[in-house]
Amino acid sequence: MTQYNDLFFRVNTGDTGDRNFGAESKNTIAYQSPDIIPQGLSPTPNPVNFFTGNYGSDVGQNLIESGDNYIYLRAKNLAGESRSGSVSLYAVPASLLLYPYLWAGNELQTSDKNVDNGNKNVIQADSGKIAVTDNPFVWRAPTPDHYCLISRVSNATHPNPVPTTAVGDMDQLTEFILDNPGFGWRNVSIVDANKPDYTTKGVDYTQGHAAAMVTFDIKCLNVPAGASVAFSAGTPGPSPLISLGETTVPQTLPDQDGNHNWHTGIDCFVPADYKTTIDYSYWSHGLAPLPGMSITVRVLPFVSDDHRLYGRLFTPEQLGMSPERSKALAGKRGIVLGSHTTVFR
């Protein structure tokens, strides 16, 4: 095989899909594919545009310990026609020789808990164009260490099956890597810099059969000023994405009960039948929790005065929204339809 003719992952930014190896300075096989793209603890808005626009660069980041890391894939279509393919991603502790049997059983999921077992996570590109996952993979990186990520794209022309027993020596591993540009390889580091002290383990969210404008709110009770919080879900669909980046809790005055309350949130249009998992995180930054500290993520639909339920619902102020959020939702009424609370003791 010389020039590959399908969706492929590069071994480095200079890789053009030419598999007639010999010019090592250009085509060195290295476990640093720029097309496996760790992006940290927040999903990337408009990932197709963003990662297509910087195809000539490696924009991957280190993985953060104890948090949900979003990982995107991109592949260039070298075929003379439009191609699509189902993508998968695998993770395994660092190994100098990545025999497939070491990682075949470690397939990662997306925010909606989708593992690619039936062409569910599909990318597509016209001839010569770049395909990008808009539904990122999510990985809760373990303790600081080095890991390897392996990407795979599969279609009818190049199924690229994962061998589990056939690759057992160095010659076979060499042939597998050289002959399968539909697989990508990247060594990654897991760091503990700015790792969250706590992250939930996936709170299910199901929209139901009707689209709606939904407020996602995070309520901090007795969280020390200077600590920070965040929440996110990477599954595409809502506009904007359900994602509040790390946000610092400000100093607040105590209420009549002596508690410090603070809220913030975002408003998203969520399509019908949307499903995902939402996680929220807390960074103490070395600050001790105040007595009775808790963090709550709430789901609140707000409606205008022409809605049939308007007269039975509550104003933003009645629901404890901050002055800023109450101003943004002025004239609307809502209700807390669901919440998830973590109490810190």
Image: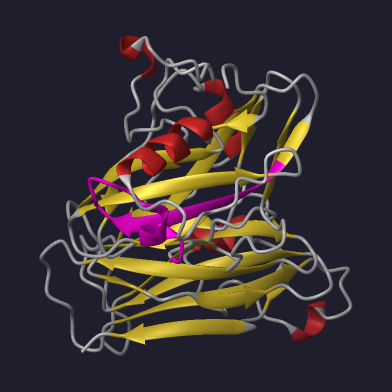
Q: Residue at x 67, y 46 (%)?
A: 159
Classify 40 as above or below 343. Answer: above
Q: Residue at x 52, y 16 (%)?
A: 16
Q: Residue at x 36, y 53 (%)?
A: 168
Please provide the residue range marked out in magenta: 85-105
Q: Position of residue 323 (x, y in %)?
A: 48, 62
Q: Is residue 289 left or right of residue 32?
A: left
Instruction: Tell me, yes or no, if residue 69 can be seen here.
Output: no
Classify 250 as above or below 191. Answer: below
Toward which corner of the image does residue 286 lie, by quadrant? bottom left
Classify 333 as above or below 225. Answer: below
Instruction: Tell me, yes or no, if residue 143 can be seen here.
Output: yes
Classify 228 as above or below 179. Answer: below
Q: Residue at x 43, y 64 (%)?
A: 106
| Residue 90 included in the magenta stretch of the image | yes
Q: Position of residue 262 (x, y in %)?
A: 37, 70
| Residue 149 included in the magenta stretch of the image | no
Q: On the rendered image, what quadrant is the C terminus found in?
A: bottom left
